[in-house]
Image (tube, rainbow, N blue to C red):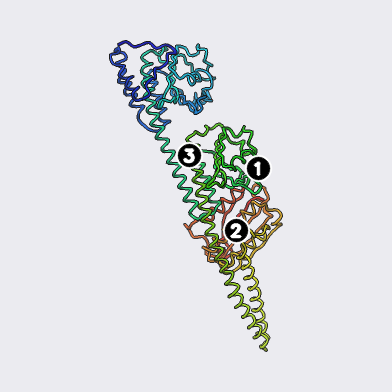
Amino acid sequence: MSVPSASADSPLPDRTPDSAGSAVRATRGLQGLSPELTSRVPQLLEAMRSVGTGLELHTTLDRICETAAELADAHYAAIGVVSEDGKGLSEFVYHGIDERTAERIGRLPDGHKGLLGALIHQPRMLRLADLSADPRSCGFPAHHPPMRSFLGVPIRVQGEIFGNLYLTEKRGGAEFNDYDVHMVRVLATEAGIAIGNARLYEAAKQRERWIDGSVAVTTALLSGSDAEEALAVVAEQARHLADSAAGIVLLPDEEGGMEIVAVSSDEPTGALGMVIPPESRIVAQLLEGQAVFIDDAATDPRAMTDLARRYGPVMMLPLHSDGRVLGTLVTPRARGARPFSEAERTLAAQFASQAALALMMAEAQRDRERLAVYEDRDRIARDLHDLVIQRLFATGMMLESAQRRSVVPEVQVGVGKAVDELDVTIQEIRTAIFALQQGPAEAPSGLRTRVLREINMAAVPLGFKPTHHFVGPVDTVVGELTGKNLIAALREALSNAFRHAQAARIDVVVDSTVALPDGQQGVRLTVADDGVGIAEGGRRSGLKNLKRRAESLGGDSWYGPGIGEDGGGTAVVWQAPY
């Protein structure tokens, strides 16, 4: 049986739809060949065995390149993975070029032109004695090693073109012969099977990661953490799973735009609180529940913020459930990064739907908890009014009567002071009752008033009212975003003091005349107590929340000695720019 000659552009007879069947036919066709080819059959079988080991896709591609180069006695080998749109290469794996040379060459081929582009649009075997003489060749970049002989063979996975296997510069300056063509063709068929298995494995692992991420988000949202922490968990998980530069969550604002409320990124973005205006076409699509995919945010004409100029491919997925759009999940990749694949888009959309459902469930759970709290607060307010104040008032009247009957001046003065203290106590209790009876929609807008309200609300569980002190024009200079976060920090600090400090005294100071380390003007909140201090090895989740909240605004938070004897207790400091 003689070996048929292979011309420079002879197509491979890929008529068999079954890749495994093609491999069997190809190896069976080698029987009865010349001693030269027969002697290479063990090498081919070993190459096929080597290619078929392992399940990691990139490792498999590296192994195919190395094995093909050894099999065909070539200096260089490469695999160009065809992009999903079929117009270029999404990945280029090479063998034979050292790292230093690769760095000097620079950018990898994209397959949009030259011989590599021709093989993408005409996937067939191509053998050339001198690739530089081919009219389709576009030459080599600077520092590229010289290459003459060339052999290109397509790799098919389940009948679909995956990419092309390229071999160049056969050792000894010879050309690739017919034996090389048949050996590499068999190897390419086996490579298609190995790549298909690796793809299935990676797809399964990827789905598993996204499912685990969804479970983590659902668990975090339903664990009772506050809404801001829950959104931060969504952003962090999405960034990790999508292999993106950042994870961002946006919520609709009152003006019809969308506000960035959670950011997860290794680099500071300064994006928290940024609003995308309602005039943006992207916002309109997202509020209608449509996903938006951008190939390059830096050049997309729809981008209306400077933040978008930093990124390349972006997925913007609406968080909608039961016909309601709760917000948007954004996962941008760095400029020049690979675009999101169809599989990644599908998995991310499923993750967003699961996160939206979990958000709704968490919101319903918090509503139930909030209703229970309001009912309890209403009961406490009634008890304070109907029982405590009435008894204090009656006690005051009894003391006033005793004061009038007493003839001892010292007793009259002492009783008078006691009556005055009772009057002050009754007024403070009435203030606490008013705070307990207020709903969230009734919260005053002034920062000073909101701070006082938090202090009065904390006085009920604490059993005493913390003292307070304001420095500077707090209401006029502190912005809404910083003010909202300061109130949340104050609530967290007072809650920690009530649960852990066992304090008899708490001082609250809000200072709007602070100069931050970077020179910006800022506001500083200090909550100091005379309690037991922070135990060694104790939980720090509340303090971590305070620090994260401050850092998201460009500020900081820390703790130190309190106001007890010899520095006993704890002082929590939280500061941020206006």
Furthest residue in direction front, as rendered: 323
What element does badge 3 sit on? helix
Of the two numbered discs 2 and 3 on the same chain, state the one appearing first in sequence.
3
* Horizontal arrangement in the rendering, residue 98 relative to residue 265 (left or right): left
Q: Would you name the residue on which mark 2 appears?
A: 490
Query: Above or below — where is 403 with respect to 539?
Result: below
- The answer to whether the residue labelled 1 contacts the one labelled 2, judged by CB atoms less than 8 Å apart, is no
Task: Count the marks.
Answer: 3
What element does badge 1 sit on? loop
| Label of residue 278 in the image | 1
Residue 428 position, x and y percent, is 64, 70
Question: Is residue 265 visible in the rendered structure shown here?
Answer: no
Residue 422 position, x and y percent, is 64, 76
Q: CA separation, marks 1 and 2?
A: 33 Å
Q: Closer to the camera, 181 or 100?
A: 181
> Callout 2, which amino acid?
Leu
Q: Residues within 10 Å of mark 3 (few under 14, many from 20)?
A: some
Of the two numbered discs 1 and 2 on the same chain, state the one appearing first in sequence.
1
> Callout 3, which amino acid?
Leu
| Label of residue 66 in the image | none
Q: Would you name the residue on which mark 3 appears?
A: 347
Q: In which quarter of the image is residue 187?
A: top left
* Horizontal arrangement in the rendering, residue 215 relative to residue 474 (left or right): left
